[in-house]
Image (cartoon, helix red, strand yellow):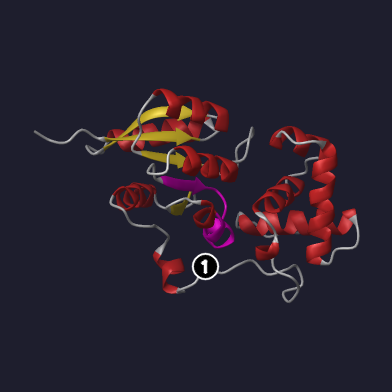
Amino acid sequence: MPAPPARVLVVDDHPIVRWGLDKLFAAEDDLAVAGEAATADEALQLMGAETFDLVLLDIGLKQGSGLDLIGQIRAQYDDLPVLVLSMYQERFYAERVLRAGAQGFVTKQGDPRAVVEAIRRVLGGDLYVSDALADELVLRAVEGPDGGGPAVEHLSDREAEVVRFIGGGLTTREIAGELNLSVKTIESYRANVKRKLGLKSGAELARFAYDWSSRSMGVEAG
């Protein structure tokens, strides 16, 4: 008698992505979408009510932080593997999500078969990154905007999240709402980022955040 398919919880705020993954897994005998969530809170509620073999999540959620969610999963469900599926380029985020406790990173821009391969590798107990990144032997961090300044690797995960939101055009108040933090706290993170990256003004921070977000998604900043 064949083993039942692995139960995957998909956490992504784009319905078309969830639909596409459901169709992709339907062609695989060993994988099945057993739950879908659009937010971190929804995902945690499902994990509390049902059993899953793997969580496939995006770090760019509209409500809550994917990086925070990885930490919450690690704290509550230590043996539950997490694989990140993101539109952001691997070299910009892979090391950060692995450090947060995920078991792998795969990009949405790649071959859909890579997602299936990554899930199977992680379910088998391995870490997963692309062959290209694995061949580099290290997960390289992002350089500063001038190519020789302080690296984004010096930012905390929360500071990096704030930079990502700034790059997306969100105001301080909007970022506070997204992360469920106070405006004062977000202002403190902004100040820390400017200090660590040697940026002198809010305008320089906005420009850096836009350039970094564009490059992390493979878009050439203008």
* Vertical arrangement, residue 167 with respect to residue 50, above or below: below
Crowding at dot 1, Cα within 10 Å, few <14 / some 14-19 / many 20+, comes out as some
Tell whether position 88 is magenta.
yes
Q: Look at the numbered disc 1 and give the secondary structure of its residue.
A: loop
Residue placed at 75% from the left, 55% from the top? Answer: 209
Residue 39 seen:
no
Mark 1, residue position: 139
| Percent coordinates x, y for residue 92 in the rendering | 59, 60
Residue 86 seen:
yes
Residue placed at 40% from the left, 52% from the top? Answer: 111
| Percent coordinates x, y for residue 211 in the rendering | 73, 58
**Residue 137 image-quadrant placement:** bottom left
* Vertical arrangement, residue 177 with respect to residue 192, above or below: above
| Boundaries of the magenta span | 82-96
Q: Which residue is at the far left? A: 1
Q: Which residue is at the far top? A: 49
Residue placed at 63% from the left, 35% from the top? Answer: 64
| Percent coordinates x, y for residue 151 in the rendering | 70, 68
Residue 29 vs residue 82: left or right? left
Residue placed at 73% from the left, 68% from the top? Answer: 144
| Percent coordinates x, y for residue 157 in the rendering | 65, 52
> From the image, which quarter does the N terminus lie in?
top left
Comparing 110 with 78, the one in front is 78
* Vertical arrangement, residue 121 with respect to residue 32, above or below: below
**Residue 154 image-quadrant placement:** bottom right
Tell whether position 192 is magenta.
no
